[in-house]
Image (cartoon, rainbow, N blue to C red):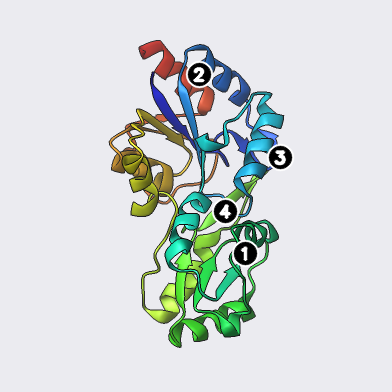
């Protein structure tokens, strides 16, 4: 059985709407017995929320174990770094960590700072985080995506905040998202041998696919990329075209 990893935002859907052809593409994969992994850097929503969204939009059953987000990596990370956790991010992210039975603290009391995404960048809080990291708190980024596609526009992503911190502090902050080692190694450690990776970002999806020795296919339905498209093995206009070409060659 062939295994395929699909990005979500900018590939299957944009905001609350399916990208044209996505439903047909997923149905085509299922009809041809592909094992689908939904691989996303979205850390503002829980795995359950993302699974429910996919089921509602695509009218399919989604195995939660097939939804791989930075929160999967975070749960392992916090087993070793679970003291005085401060969350910069959404309420869903805070609830997720709390449900893992970890106590969240105020920034001033933190030893570990988890950097997620907020709808509006909080510059005052970022400055306080910079000072706290200088005092010894350990930052961890859920991903380094500079932008986040949403219904025809690009919003600041986790990476926008991470870049401010890194530039000011002169350090590189570890990330748990695509294409970084922690995320990529998850598939290798679980012996999940992905054959194809499809996504709209060169800096995350394509590099992730290349790192795990999968065929990387860039689709042009999401963001404007700053890295060259030639890093991908193939380029297609959208998910349906990418999936159709894969199925025809299988």
Residue carrying label 3: 16
Q: Earlier in the sequence, mark 4 or mark 1?
A: 4
Residue 155: name its quadrant. Answer: bottom right
The correct choice, above or below, for 146 with respect to 166 in the image is: above
Q: Earlier in the sequence, mark 1 or mark 3?
A: 3
Label 1, label 2: how far apart the Cα atoms are: 34 Å
Residue carrying label 1: 89
Question: Which image quarter holds the C terminus?
Answer: top left
Residue carrying label 4: 43
The correct choice, above or below, for 129 with respect to 65 in the image is: below
Q: Residues within 10 Å of mark 1 (few under 14, many from 20)?
A: many
Q: CB of mark 4 within 8 Å of CB of mark 1?
A: yes
Secondary structure at numbered mark 1: loop
Q: CB of mark 1 within 8 Å of CB of mark 3?
A: no
Q: Earlier in the sequence, mark 3 or mark 4?
A: 3
Q: CB of mark 4 within 8 Å of CB of mark 2?
A: no
Q: Residue sitting at 40 percent across and 26 percent down?
A: 3
Q: CB of mark 1 within 8 Å of CB of mark 2?
A: no
């Amino acid at each position: 059985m062939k295994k395929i990893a699909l990005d979500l935002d900018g590939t299957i859907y944009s905001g609350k709407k399916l990208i044209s052809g996505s439903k047909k593409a997923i149905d085509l994969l299922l009809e041809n017995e592909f094992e689908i992994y939904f691989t996303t850097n979205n850390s503002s929503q829980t795995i359950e929320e993302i699974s429910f969204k996919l089921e509602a939009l695509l009218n399919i059953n989604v195995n939660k174990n097939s939804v791989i987000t930075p929160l999967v990596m975070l749960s392992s990370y916090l087993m070793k770094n679970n003291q005085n956790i401060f969350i910069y991010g959404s309420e869903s992210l805070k609830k997720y960590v709390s449900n893992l039975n970890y106590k969240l603290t105020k920034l001033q009391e933190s030893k570990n700072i988890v950097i997620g995404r907020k709808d509006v960048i909080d510059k005052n809080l970022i400055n306080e985080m910079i000072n706290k990291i200088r005092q010894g708190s350990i930052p961890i980024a859920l991903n380094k995506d500079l932008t986040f596609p949403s219904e025809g526009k690009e919003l600041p992503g986790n990476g926008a905040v991470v870049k401010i911190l890194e530039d000011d502090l002169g350090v590189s902050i570890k990330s748990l998202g695509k294409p970084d080692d922690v995320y990529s190694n998850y598939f290798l450690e679980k012996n999940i041998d992905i054959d194809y990776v499809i996504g709209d970002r060169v800096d995350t999806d394509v590099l992730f696919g290349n790192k795990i020795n999968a065929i990387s296919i860039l689709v042009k339905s999401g963001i404007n990329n700053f890295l060259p498209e030639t890093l991908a093995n193939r380029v297609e206009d959208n998910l349906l075209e990418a999936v159709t070409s894969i199925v025809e060659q299988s």
